[in-house]
Image (cartoon, rainbow, N blue to C red):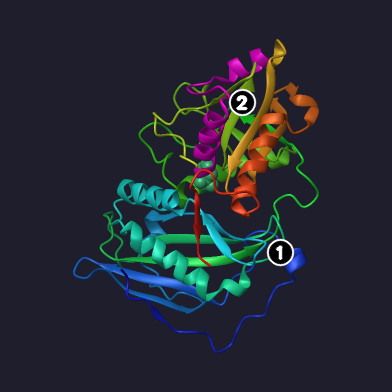
Amino acid sequence: MLNIRIEKTTSPRVRPDYSKLGFGKHFTDHMFLMNYSPEKGWHDARIVPYGPLSLDPSAMVFHYAQELFEGLKAYRREDGGIQLFRPDKNIERMNNTCDRLCVPRIAPEDALQAIKAVVEVDKDWVPHEFGTSLYIRPFIIATDEFLGVHPSHSYLFCIILSPSGAYYEAGINPVKIGVEREYVRCVKGGTGMSKCGGNYAASLIGQQKAEEKGYAQVLWLDGIHRKYIDEVGAMNVFFVIDGVVITPDLSDGSILPGVTRDSCIALLKHWGIPVEERKISIDEVIGAYKNGTLDEAFGSGTAAVISPIGELYDGDTKMVINNNEIGNISKHLYDAITGMQWGKFPDSMGWIEKID
Ligand SMILES: *Cc1c(COP(=O)(O)O)cnc(C)c1O
């Protein structure tokens, strides 16, 4: 149990226009901070007014990217209450990322307490419309003042909150995706399964290239054979071929284990829809398209929940999937997950953590 000191702001921030929130642009009145040192462990848990951090320019995070993050949301129910969706999964993944990046773990119960406490303090900021949410961004940075290449000894854990608009404001529209053949996101043995800023820095060039061609996201192939599908942009990816749902398996450690991915697999199993976690090559997807069995394709992630792929481009090959419309399985998953998250459906899977 953390002993969290709370210092409330005396100058509340100006509220954004809640009809034009967008994503990740506005921040609430407070943030959670906690420091780590080898002598004290994680200590000095506090909720303080939101504002700039003061760091020495030699702080290790600026040089060797010893940084990791998480992303989850607080949802407003119709009865006014607030809830989280599977926060234990985000905390477990954060600690797995800590292990990979030589960062000390945070006790899961302390991390959950911190998330709930800061959301509670800023609960008025959780928007009310269906589809809107309070995005929660926990992150850890290395703070040693040192330029040697070595794991830091001191760290800062921070949680910031951002009221965000509905991902789909005008209905779910399928996106264009381009297969990336030049750059890779990660390789086996690397940090593909870790949620760290470094992965994103390495992926920007592929994303930029895709945007220049008019695609929303990149379809990443594996870094060794350059043929098995890893992920789509910053989402996990699913294909429905001849009635079977297929998603790349996590065994190579090159894929981020998404909470939404896990939720989709669990629901599909619960519904008795065949689902396979296995390697799937881009050639298999193109082959299925050509013989007419590629029924649906979609990305999964906290931001969009489900993002149907309407058009898939590989060089000069253009594939239009399900008439560029959302498919039945995609829609069924989207409705079930969002229904639970915003409390419209009963929590039949035990995935909801109420705050209020
Ligand atoms: C966060 C993330 C995902 C999606 O994970 P969720 O827990 O479902 O939000 C997928 N891929 C990458 C690279 C990510 O960073």
- Could you say where residue 141 lies in the image, as x and y percent from the top left? 39, 62
What is the number of the mark on residue 21?
1
Work out whether 272 lies above or below 211. above
Q: Amino acid at mark 1?
A: Leu
Magenta segment, prevailing SS (helix, strand or loop): helix
Question: As drawn, which residue projects farthest toward the bottom?
Answer: 10
Residue at 70%, 41% (x, y): give it: 216
What is the number of the mark on residue 221?
none
Work out whether 157 lies above or below 308. below
Q: Residues within 10 Å of mark 1 (few under 14, many from 20)?
A: some
Q: State which region is magenta.
A: 259-288
Can residue 306 be seen at all in this image of the molecule?
no
Mark 1: secondary structure: loop
Question: As drawn, which residue projects farthest toward the top?
Answer: 291
Which image quadrant is residue 218 in?
top right
Residue at 65%, 16% (x, y): give it: 242
Q: Give the left or right position of residue 149, taking residue 278 as reference.
A: left
What is the number of the mark on residue 239?
2
Establish whether ligand 1 lies closer than 8 Å to the Cβ of label 2: no
- Could you say where residue 339 lies in the image, as x and y percent from the top left? 64, 48
Give yes or no for residue 261 being in the magenta stretch: yes
Counting residues from the start of the chain, the first of labels 1 and 2 encountered is: 1
Quadrant assignment for the N terminus: bottom left
Q: Amino acid at mark 2?
A: Phe
Pointer 1 with pointer 2, Cβ within 8 A: no
Residue at 70%, 73% (x, y): give it: 16
